[in-house]
Image (spheres, rainbow, N blue to C red):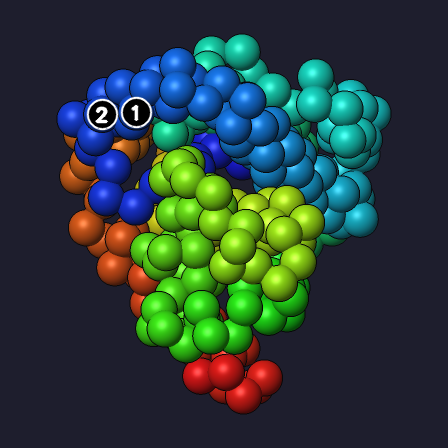
Amino acid sequence: MMGSLFITYRKGETSLSILNRLQAWFNWLTTDPLGFLLYLLYFAVSVLLTLILHEIAHGYVAYRCGDPTAKMLGRLSMDPRKHLDPIGTACLVFLGFGWAKPVPVNPRNFGNYRRDDFLVSIAGVTVNLTLFLLSMALAVGFNGLLWKPEVIAANGGAKEFLSTSGIGYSILVSGSGGDFTEYMLHPWVMYIQRFLLMFYSMNLGVGLFNLLPIPPLDGFHIFNDLLFKGKFQLNQQVFQIAQVVLLVACFSGVLNGVITAVFDAVEGGVLNLFLLMVGKA
């Protein structure tokens, strides 16, 4: 099996902040039901695309490496029903982390086990990080069409409207409330920008989390193939125990500091590079 755990990581989130977020969602729903439902729509589309493309990447690369298992079982489909796990999806919505159905892989069909296992393992992460780069690049381009230049200049520059910790993300994604259309050049662009900001942050979080060298994440297979030449094998029982430990670590916030630091570093570095390329740094 490949890619059995799917995490949408939210920076700095612990069990307490999860409860706070659920309370904030309830308040948002009661004060602005249309805005909250619109947020859920964006969230659902972002999650489904991120999850499905991640899983399809595993199955497609396995197919190209000689294993038709995922293809025969219909896992190369954009149909969400082929990939969603009911409990994992519920956790994804309410807790911020969850899992998809594992992609079935039969390594006995690989022509070169170590090489093909590495390629299949890294496929999902590669797709997520590629989508992160593409959606962030588009967000940088649309930013100048959305906000008035004087508004950008008066609030710390373009980065403040593009990073997940900035004012733009808070306005467009997090439901900060208020009508900000008077500060916009083309208000209709906010519907595109909202998706791009949410989509890039989700793909970056998923890509980085799945690079952790902890079973059953993709990173375990990647580092096993690179460092141990595929010789470090764990049985199914150990994988299941490791998955429970990983979920507990996620829910308790043990991994928050590490992932937040890496997320901020990658997001900030790439965003600075894109802004430098367009002369907005």
Q: Residue at x 43, y 55 (%)?
A: 168
Residue 158's spot in the image, x, y percent? Answer: 45, 72
Residue density around tag 1, few if under 14, some if 14–19, many if 20 or more, within 10 Å: some
> Which label was assigned to residue 24?
1
Give the quarter of the figure containing the N terminus: top right
Q: Residue at x 29, y 51 (%)?
A: 259
- Label 1 is placed on what type of residue? Ala
Can you say whether 71 is above or below 115 in the image? above
- SS label for mark 1: helix
Looking at the image, which residue sits at the far top?
86
Q: Residue at x 66, y 38 (%)?
A: 49
Foreground tag (2 vs 1): 1
Res 279 quadrant in image:
bottom right
The residues tagged by marks 2 and 1 sit, at their Cα atoms, a distance apart of: 6 Å
Q: Can residue 35 be seen in this view?
A: yes
Can you say whether 222 is above or below 9 in the image? below
Give 102 or 14, whichever is nearer the viewer: 14
- Label 2 is placed on what type of residue? Asn
> Which label was assigned to residue 20?
2
Can you say whether 48 is above or below 174 in the image? above
